[in-house]
Amino acid sequence: MVDAMLEFMLGPLRGISDFYLDYQLYFNTIIVGFALYKILFSQKKTQESAN
C-alpha cells in the first residue's frame, strides 16, 4: 500500500531516490566533507583578516 502511494506521489523521482539510497554513504560523505572544508577555510580567512 505504501509502495503504491509513493510510486504515485513521487513518479519519476522514485528512481532517483532509489539511486540515492543505494549510494547514501558516498553522497553523505561528500556533503559532510565539503561542509567541513568550507567551515575550516572560512575560519582561516576571518582569522587572517582580524590580524
Image (spheres, rainbow, N blue to C red):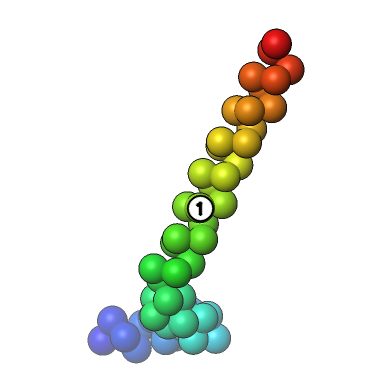
x, y percent for residue 41: 62, 36
According to the image, label 1 marks what residue?
A: 33
Height in image: 50 above or below 33? Answer: above
Q: Is residue 50 visible?
A: yes
Name the residue rendered at 49%, 86% in the picture. 15
- Three-letter code, disc 1: Gly
In the figure, residue 28 lies in which quadrant?
Answer: bottom left
Height in image: 51 above or below 6? Answer: above
Callout 1 crowding tier (Cα within 10 Å): few <14, some 14–19, many ≥20? few
Q: Nearer the viewer, residue 16 or 28?
A: 28
Name the residue rendered at 51%, 44% in the picture. 36
Which part of the image, by quadrant, shows the N terminus?
bottom left
In the figure, residue 42 lies in which quadrant?
Answer: top right
Height in image: 51 above or below 16? Answer: above
Name the residue rendered at 41%, 70% in the picture. 24
x, y percent for residue 17: 46, 77
Which part of the image, by quadrant, shows the C terminus?
top right
- Mark 1 residue element: helix
